[in-house]
Image (cartoon, rainbow, N blue to C red):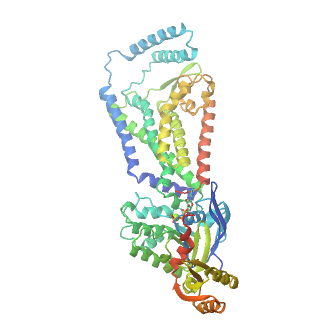
Amino acid sequence: MQKQPIIQIKNLKKQIGKTTIIHGISLDLYPGEVFGFLGPNGAGKTTTIRMMVGLMNITEGEVLINGYSVEKNFEKAIAYVGGIIENPEMYKYLTGYDNLIHYSRMIPKIKIERIEEIVKLVGLEKRIHEKVKTYSLGMRQRLGLAQALLHSPSVLILDEPTNGLDPAGIREIRTYIRKLAVEENITVFVSSHLLSEMQLMCDRIGIIHHGKLISVETVKNMLEDNQHLSVNFTVSPLKEALSYVKKTNPKIKAEIIDHRLIIYTSEDQITTFAKLFVNNGFSLTGIHGEQKSLEEKFIQITGGDLHV
Amino acid sequence: MFNMFRLVQNENMKIYKRLGTWIMIGLILMIVIFAGGITKYLLAENVNLNWEEQVQIENAQLLEQIEEYENMPMVGSSAIQPLKEDVMINNYRLENDIPPVENETLWGFMLSSPDFTALASVFVIVISAGIVATEFSTGTIKLLLIRPVKRSKILISKYIATLIFAIIMLLTIFVSSLIVGSMLFGFDGINLPYLVYSGGEVIERNMLVQIITFYGLNSIDMIMMVTFAFMISSVFRSSSLAIGLSLFLMFTGQQLVMVLSDYNWAKYILFANTNLYQYVAGTPIIEGMTLAFSIIILSVYFFLFILISWFTFNKRDVAA
Ligand SMILES: Nc1ncnc2c1ncn2[C@@H]1O[C@H](COP(=O)(O)OP(=O)(O)OP(=O)(O)O)[C@@H](O)[C@H]1O
Ligand SMILES: [Mg+2]
C-alpha cells in the first residue's frame, strides 16, 4: 500500500476519570479499503470511533483525516466523513425526507438533486415521505446510510451497522459496503464483535481488546495463515519436552494442556518436531493436528480473559 | 451568516413539525378568547355612577389611607408615594376630562393581556428545556455533531430558534388580544392616553406604546427564565430537570426574595431584578435598588447562563 493514508490514528488514548479506556491505538487507513474493527463488548470500539469523529475529547494522541486534525481542524476533517454511531437515531417525528433535508442544510453547497439520488441509492423512494417512526429497523439503517453518504464522503465510519438486522439485512449492508469501497473508492471503517461477518466484507481486520489494538492483519493473510494449526503431541516427559521446544525454537508458541504438548505451528513443521522429539530421547506416542478457525483464534485472543 | 440561517431553519423545522408546539399555540389562543369572554359576560360591572363620581370616591379612599399610613411610624414614605401618585393622576383626569380605561374596552383588555405572558413563559421554557436535551436523550446529537459545523454555531442556532419561538408566543398573545378585544369591545375610547406620574408631574403617553412597553418588560422576565432553562438543559442534558427547575424558580423566586428582603445581599438574587415593573410603578422589592442596578445584575446573569451553556456544550464528551 503505497497510497497516502486517508485516516491516520496516532497513539490515541482516552482516559475517563482515572481509568484509561483506550491505551494508545495507532492505525493508518487507505482509500478504498474496508477495515474491520473487531472486539468483544466493552473493548473500546465505540469510544475509539467517538474520538475519531470528534464526539469525545482525545486525551492523548491525534486523529488525522486527509491530513486534517479532528481536534484542531474539526470542520475540515469531518467534511470527509460520513458515519453512523451505534444506532441510526433520526428525528422520528419528521419524515425521512425532512431528516435528509435537515442534514443537507449543514453541508455547504449541496444540490437538492443529491437527496433524490441518495434516496434512490438506498432504495427508500416509496417510504421517504413518511415519518421515520413508521420505519422498520432495516429502513432506519438505510436512512442512516443515506445521511452518511449525502455529502459524498471519502470515509464511512460505521459502528456495528448490522446490529439487530436479520440475515437478509446484514447481507444487504455487506454487499453495499463492498460496492462503495470498490466502485466509489470510499474507505469504510466498520466495527463489529462478530468475526464471521467481518471476514466476508473486510480487506483488513484489526482486533481491539481492553482498549489495545492487539493485531492488524489482512483477511487474506488470516485465511492463508496456517499458524493456526494447533498440534497435539503426546510426548513424555512432558515438561522437559516443552522446555526443549522452547529452547530450540524461541519464537514458537507452545503450552501444556491435558497432559499433552500443544504447539501452534504450520503443517510443514510437524515432521520437524516429531524428529526433534524422537532424536532426543523423548517417547512420542501420538500426533494430532487441528485447524483452528479464525473465530477460534479471535476467541483465543480475546475471549479467554474476558473477566480480566 | 448564510450557514447560520440554515441552521436556524433546521431548528425551526424541529420545533414546528411537532404537534406539541401547535397545541401550545392553540392553548394560548383559547386562553385569550376565554379571558375575553369572561371579561365581557361575567365581570361586566353595572355601576350607575359616572366616571367622575367613581374617581372622586377612589380619591377619597386613597387620601384616607395616606393619612392612616402617615400616622404609622413603621410605614415608610416609599409605601405612601405610589398612593399619592394615584391621587395626582386621578386629579389630572378630573381636570382634563380624561376618563380611566375600563376593563370592558379594547384598551382595558389589551392592558391586561401582558399577564398571559406568564403562561407563554411556561411553554417557551418547555421548548427551551428540550431543544438541547432531547437531542441527547434521543441520541440524535451524535448525527448532529458530526457535520462540518462548529458546535458553538449549533448551540447559537438553537438559542436563536428558542428566542424566535418566544417572539411568536408574544405576538400570538398580542395579535389575538387585539382581535378578540376589538371584536368583543369595539373601539370606544380608542383615543385615550395612558397617564403616568413621572418627575413630579402627570404625563400623557400613547396607549399602544405603553402596552408594547408592558410586553417588553414582561419579556425580560421570560427571557431570563428561558435562558436559565437553556443552560440547565445543556449542562444536565435532561429536559425534565430543566423544565422542573425553571418553573419551580419562576413561581417561587419572587417569594424567596420577599422572605430574604431584610438582607441587603438579596438584591443580587436574579428574581429580585426580573420584575422591572417595580421601577415603572410601585417600589423596588429591596430598598435602594435602581433600574440601572437591575439591568446590570440581569446582564451579568444572562452572560453567565450563556457562557455556562456554551462551555459545557462545546467541551464535554458526547456519550449519549
Ligand atoms: N462515559 C464513560 N465513562 C466511563 N467508562 C466508560 C464510558 N464510556 C465507555 N466506558 C467504558 O469503556 C469501555 C469501552 O466501551 P465502548 O462502548 O467503547 O466498548 P465497545 O467496544 O463499543 O463495546 P460494545 O461492543 O458493547 O458496543 C467499557 O468498559 C465501558 O464501560
Ligand atoms: Mg459499541
Q: How many marks?
A: 0
Residue at image coords 50%, 43%: B242
Residue at image coords 60%, 28%: B267
Please state, as top left, top right, bottom left or bottom right, where the C terminus of chain A lies in the image.
Answer: bottom right
Residue B278 seen in render: yes
| Relative height, residue B159 to residue B117 (above, below) | below
The x, y position of residue B276, in whole percent, is 55, 30
| Relative height, residue B201 to residue A263 (above, below) | above
Please state, as top left, top right, bottom left or bottom right, where the N terminus of chain A lies in the image.
Answer: bottom right
| In-image side of B184 versus B11 (left or right) | left
The x, y position of residue B215, in whole percent, is 49, 35
Q: Nearer the viewer, residue B54 or B306?
A: B306
| Relative height, residue B15 to residue A69 (above, below) | above
Q: Quadrant of residue B231?
A: top right
Q: Residue furthest top?
A: B71
Q: Nearer the viewer, residue B287 or A302?
A: A302
| In-image side of B275 versus A279 (left or right) | left
The x, y position of residue B290, in whole percent, is 62, 27
Q: Quadrant of residue B61?
A: top left
Residue A154 seen in render: no
The x, y position of residue A121, in whole percent, is 44, 75
| Relative height, residue A135 to residue A182 (above, below) | above
Residue at image coords 48%, 11%: B65
Q: Nearer the viewer, residue B207 or B161?
A: B161
